[in-house]
């Protein structure tokens, strides 16, 4: 159970950053990560509402960090 909580904290955040770097758009990165999370919920790979909540919070934090990262990249140019 501890492994699932740790993964729920870090994986959505990192996936948003990865997809944002690949697609150059933080909305696309967030949408792709949300689609992966939804698929895992439907397939039953996650257990309990606490994991759902942690995933959603991590997704939100990843979105705002990716937006900040993208804005800083455009300011440097």
Image (cartoon, grey):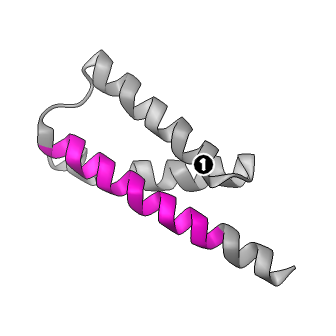
Asked whether residue 40 is in view, the answer is yes
Position of 17 with respect to 24 (left or right) is: left
The quarter of the picture where residue 9 lies is bottom left
Q: Which residue is found at the position 12% from the left and 35% from the top?
A: 48
Which quadrant of the figure has residue 47? Answer: top left
Please, is residue 69 above or below residue 13 in the view?
A: below
In the picture, which quadrant includes the C terminus?
bottom right
In the rendered structure, the answer to whether residue 69 lies left or right of residue 36 reads right
Image coordinates for residue 25, horizontal then vertical, percent: 69, 52
In the rendered image, residue 64 lying in the magenta stretch gets the answer yes
Q: Which residue is mark 1?
A: 27
Q: Seen in the image, is 46 located left or right of residue 35?
A: left
Can residue 7 be seen at all in this image of the molecule? no
Residue sitting farthest toward the right: 77
Q: Is residue 22 magenta?
A: no
Residue 50 % position (x, y): 13, 45
Q: Which residues are magenta?
A: 50-69
């Amino acid at each position: 159970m501890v492994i699932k909580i740790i993964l729920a904290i870090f994986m959505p955040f990192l996936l948003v950053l990865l997809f944002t770097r690949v697609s150059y758009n933080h909305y696309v990165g967030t949408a792709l990560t949300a689609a992966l999370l939804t698929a895992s919920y439907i397939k039953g790979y996650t257990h309990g509402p606490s994991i759902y909540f942690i995933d959603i919070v991590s997704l939100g934090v990843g979105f705002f960090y990716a937006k900040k990262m993208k804005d800083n990249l455009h300011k440097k140019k």
